[in-house]
Image (tube, rainbow, N blue to C red):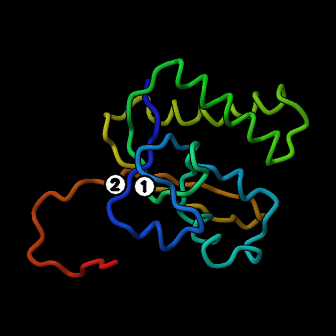
Amino acid sequence: MKFLKTIRFDPSDTHVFEIAAEPDQWAIPGGYCFAGNKEDDLKGKTKQAFSNGFLSLESFGFSTFTSVCEINSDEVLLITQDLAKRFVEVNGAPDMSAATAVAEQEVSFVLEMCAEVPINTVFALSRSFDEAGEIREAFRIVEAPREAAHTRVWEIVE
């Protein structure tokens, strides 16, 4: 089986998200975090997390990019249980049974998304509200550059 893990190409996530996920943490899209919001409710770093952040299942921070990695069934069970527990404790799910059903849906979505792509495939996401105010997510595979750049355009300095 394959699943998403957070990756970091540069330190920008630590600047654009309120809580940045550390590299190498299991991740889901995490759009549920913004349920009940309207576009005008989202400002600053929260808006950035909404627009392009994958949710880490360890730190519950956000990452701009994820990479496809192998996962075993024990790890899938553990992250599903941890996510269900968070749904109850933080997100107001009525009980573990209801929370587990939703957590299984979130985890299954990622397993299906990763099933047919190679290990190390890099994903980015774009999240927005549609005309009806519903959250929409679009995923894209980030391709590696085919040839070396002619010149460095910028450098990120801490």
Residue at x 51% of width, y 31% of height? 112
* Lower sequence index among marks 2 and 1: 1
The quadrant in which the C terminus is found is bottom left
Q: Residue furthest right?
A: 94
Task: Choose top left, top right, bottom left or bottom right for residue 45.
Answer: bottom right
- State left or right for residue 129 relative to residue 35: left
Callouts 2 and 1 close, C-beta under 8 Å: yes
Amino acid type, callout 1: Phe
- State left or right for residue 69 relative to residue 29: left
Task: Choose top left, top right, bottom left or bottom right for residue 69.
Answer: top left
The quadrant in which the N terminus is found is top left
Amino acid type, callout 2: Val
Percent x, y for residue 77?
A: 60, 22
**Label 2 crowding class (10 Å Cα cut-off): few <14, some 14-19, many 20+?**
some
Callout 2 secondary element: strand
Q: Nearer the viewer, mark 2 or mark 1?
A: 1
What label sits on residue 132 in the rendered view? Answer: none
Give the camera-side residue of 1 and 158. Answer: 158
**Label 1 crowding class (10 Å Cα cut-off): few <14, some 14-19, many 20+?**
many
Residue 70's place in the image compared with 14, above or below, is above
Residue at x 65% of width, y 70% of height? 46
Residue at x 39% of width, y 51% of height? 7
Measured in 3D between alpha carbons, the distance from the residue under mark 2 to the one under mark 1, in whole angstroms, is 9 Å
What label sits on residue 142 in the rendered view? Answer: 2
Callout 1 secondary element: strand
Tell me the residue that label 1 is attached to. 65
